[in-house]
Image: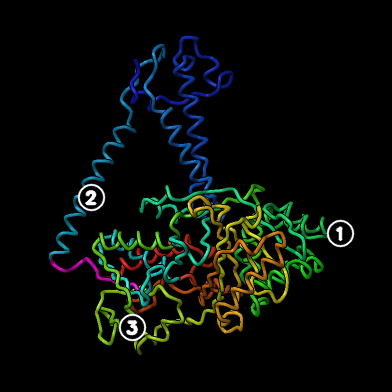
Amino acid sequence: MLSVGSIASCPSEPAPGRGRAASLPKEHPSRSPCGRYLRKRSRIRRQVRGEDFCNGEHVSGYDSLLARLRWVRCCRWIWRAPRAGDRCISYPPPRSIALASRLRESSARRGQLEQGRRARCGASGSGEMRIAILGGGVAGLACAHYLAKAGHTPVVLEASGWVGRLGAPIEHGGLRLDGEAHLLRNTDTALCGLLGELGGLGRVSWRMTSSAVAVGDRHYPVSTARELIRCLGLNRVDRVRAALGFAYATKLKRYALHLDTVPVSEWLARIFGRHVYETCWRPLLESRFGEYVDEVPAYWAWRQLNGYQTGRREVFGHLRGGASWLAERLRRKIEKGGGEVRLHARATAVETTGTHVGVEIHGSEERFDSAVFAQPPGDLAKIARPRLARELPNLDVPYQGRVTALLVSRRSLGSQYRTTLVGRGLAFQTVIEATRVMSSESLEGRHLIYLRGDCGPHTDTFNLPDDVLGKQAIDTIKCWFPAFDPAAIEGVYVTRDAHAEPITLLGQLSRRLPTRIPNTRVLLCNSAQAYPRRVGWDADVTLARETAAAAAAVL
């Protein structure tokens, strides 16, 4: 009988009829059932090994998760005990099993040494750093979480009374609702890794969804590239050119970082034609970027187009509990790891020396070994003291503001998860029905409809009263969804975010903010550093992990 260890050392054989296996005698082990078993195991391993688990731009986190599950199923088959009737000669004990055992013992010894080092450092007051995190958003809390895991003492300083950056959740009929629709994409591998550490993967529901573009009184599905081309209302010549432009952008042009210095208007007009650009792309860009439409790099459009490259339906996820659950769970993890989260702690001044960072809180200075600024970078320039101010790079990063109206309704809006409204002078450009991803039963049969309006903090729309914006949101639903009955709306809630997303300008890669400000002990961790990544929770978690590693290196 063959042992599991022997199976692991058996070499895989070529397919029958080719190579050495074709000339082997009938009773040779490679012609036995066990030999076929080994060949199947080798084929499965090659299949699984071909999956890409990298956290890159074009790697699907949803596919990565499926591949990992497939790997678990394969391992159950690969390492099964041999069955009765398997004929195979005995092989010496495999070196791989012995090597794995030695690696496990070495890892255990390293863990014991690390625990002893941390205990000695804690007793002597050296080695373990006390680090201030200015900002209690997802990026700041995640950075503090990773620092606490590394054995340091993070202190999160949040100016408001709530962690999570967007303030208190909305209370409606005993339900706690997010004021903003937070989308989880099937490429958010870093975020899923953090949720796994927090025990939140079971709270994520994934759904295949569909999107649409509303032009005039018609709604066109745009979940795939074919649907998007069909909805543009083009003649035959322009439709062929649009199809060729999609093929070029998604199939041929696989590396496009050089488009960071090319205006999006010039690139789109070149590959799609001037007529298609002016009638289709220009209104979308104007509603998205406003006055910065001519300064947006073509890389942004290339990344958007590559969302259609697989030809499959889009997949979005929803975290049950939303941003408030994620922020509170991170807070508990930080405090359990020895860190601290302070609310109503506004930092009014920051100064750095060669050995520490001084942060002024409520008029008194507190010293830290290092500091991480997890707020919009322009705010750091306002509170930096002379020595730190001399070392600061250009922190003038424009941000896009956002007004969001949440409609709580007893009726569904339609079959689409997200609808983009095309037109000029619209208060809201995107309609998202979150209950197309989350279950309406968890909301007692209610439906959540979010209307997003991208506008600068200095615009009139951003500064309108809540009741006026709420009325405009209901009027928008009446105009674009005439079949919906407004009487089904139970409540309207308006939220504002002056720093919703940094605006990407031409040449942004060459002006990307550093993780650590030179010659100081101050680090940056904010969405302005995400480019060329897509802005969102996943980028925040990735930046937090990188910043935590850099902060741990500041001695």
Q: Residue at x 32, y 78 (%)?
A: 345
Residue 269 in the image: above or below residue 253: below
Which sits earlier in the primary sequence, circle 3 or circle 1? 1
Q: Residue at x 52, y 20 (%)?
A: 20
Query: Residue 59 location, x and y as percent?
Result: 54, 51
Q: Magenta segment: does it hold 522? A: no
Which sits earlier in the primary sequence, circle 1 or circle 2? 2
Mark drawn on residue 285 = none
Residue 90 in the image: above or below residue 266: above
Mark 3 sits on what residue?
Answer: 350
Residue 263 in the image: above or below residue 231: below
Which sits earlier in the primary sequence, circle 2 or circle 3? 2
Q: Amino acid at mark 3?
A: Val
Judging depth in this view, the residue of 319 and 359 nearest the camera is 319
Judging depth in this view, the residue of 486 and 145 nearest the camera is 486
Mark 2 sits on what residue?
Answer: 111
